[in-house]
Image: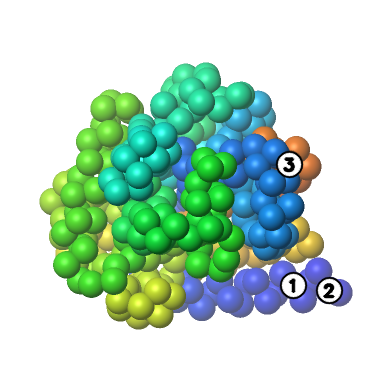
Amino acid sequence: MTSKFSYLKSFAAAADINRKGKNVKQKLIIIESDDWGAIRTPSKEALGFFEKKGFDIANSIYKNDALASQDDLEKLFEVLQSYKGADGKPAVITANSIMANPDFEKIKAHDFQNYFWEPFTETFKRYPKHQNNFQLWKHGMDEKVFRPQLHGREHLNIKRWMKALQSKHEAILTSFDQQTTYSGKGDYSFMEAYDWDVPEEVKEHETIIEEALKIFEEHFGFRSKSFIAPCYNWDTKLESFLSHHGIDWIQSLRSQLQPTGVFDNYLSIRHSFAQPQNGLRYNVRNCFFEPSMLPQKDWVNACLAQIQAAFLFSKPAVICSHRINFVGFINPKNGDRGLNDLNQLLKAITRKWPDAKFITTDELSNYI
């Protein structure tokens, strides 16, 4: 009874999201997964260090999240390759990727007065089980199960982080020495990359995104056609700039978090699927699969209910599922749980909707 009630509750919530927006005749499944390439917790040892320091890590994503290891990637790709859509193509994730991370050594060498970054591929080389990651990414692309799209240059509000470092904030410096931006308190750990304190910072964000687009094309050999802002937080003024640089789709939740100049005090702007604005369209996430975020929840059945609601209203089923769900580098049980649930979800999808196709966000334009 509880399971049925939960299913109906998920269906009703998703139905409300899908009432508006453009219709699509075909049954399309899009799995949008954020944070690929971005650092979080660098090791089990660092996690233990934070716990000893008394950091509130118990309910933080930093407890499980890290750069996916070679083993994590291989296991994920194996699950995705096991299931095919109606067109014979495998399940695929739109891997929203961060192109760079802080260069901690250079920043410290300059006494925290200047910011420096390194490409995500260089970060891979410094981790113990990640040296072949970029080759594996390309293998996943060749196998049509892993399709990078742009998430930004860093998953980091550079100005706020550098200001905290320059103020010699103890917790920030402690985290810095562990090669992470974890802040030890509830401020997203500076992850809101395109939030601003004054509107003039939007121009700086344009420069950062332009550089990210360049790094993306240099590494993958094609341009990203979609973009997702870290923490769903961006200024509408960025949209014309993104369109000018070849972005066709903005990935987002139902509501955009428009900066106001005050952290965590945002203007909520509603969007609907394929809504055109400033030369691009919105792709609204209407299904959620986040086993790592709330382990006690039945994510498989909840997501299936949301997919059913999407199809009932002739919308693509756009599944939000962050990288953290598939990573076992810090905590193997976390990765095992996420992959097991993903396996169950994909099995149920292919059985219940044999006419559904798995596509990537940048392929949406072929169906609109």
State how far apart marks 3 and 2 are (Cα): 30 Å
The disc label shown at residue 193, or none: none
Residue 216 location (% of width, % of height) = 30, 35
SS for tag 1? helix
Q: Earlier in the sequence, mark 3 or mark 1?
A: 1
In this rendered view, identify the residue nearer to me: 166 or 300.
166
Residue 242 location (% of width, % of height) = 20, 53
Q: Which residue is mark 3?
A: 331
Amino acid on which the number 2 mark rests in the picture: Thr
In this rendered view, identify the residue nearer to me: 48 or 320.
48
In this rendered view, identify the residue nearer to me: 53 or 362.
53
From where the camera sits, is residue 339 visible? Answer: no
Q: Look at discs 3 and 2 and give the one toward the viewer.
A: 3
Q: Look at discs 3 and 1 and give the one toward the viewer.
A: 3
Q: Is residue 3 left or right of 290 when viewed as pictured?
A: right
State how far apart marks 3 and 1 are (Cα): 28 Å
Residue at screen point 47% across, 42% down: 38
Instruction: In the rendered view, tell whether residue 316 sits above or below residue 366.
Output: below
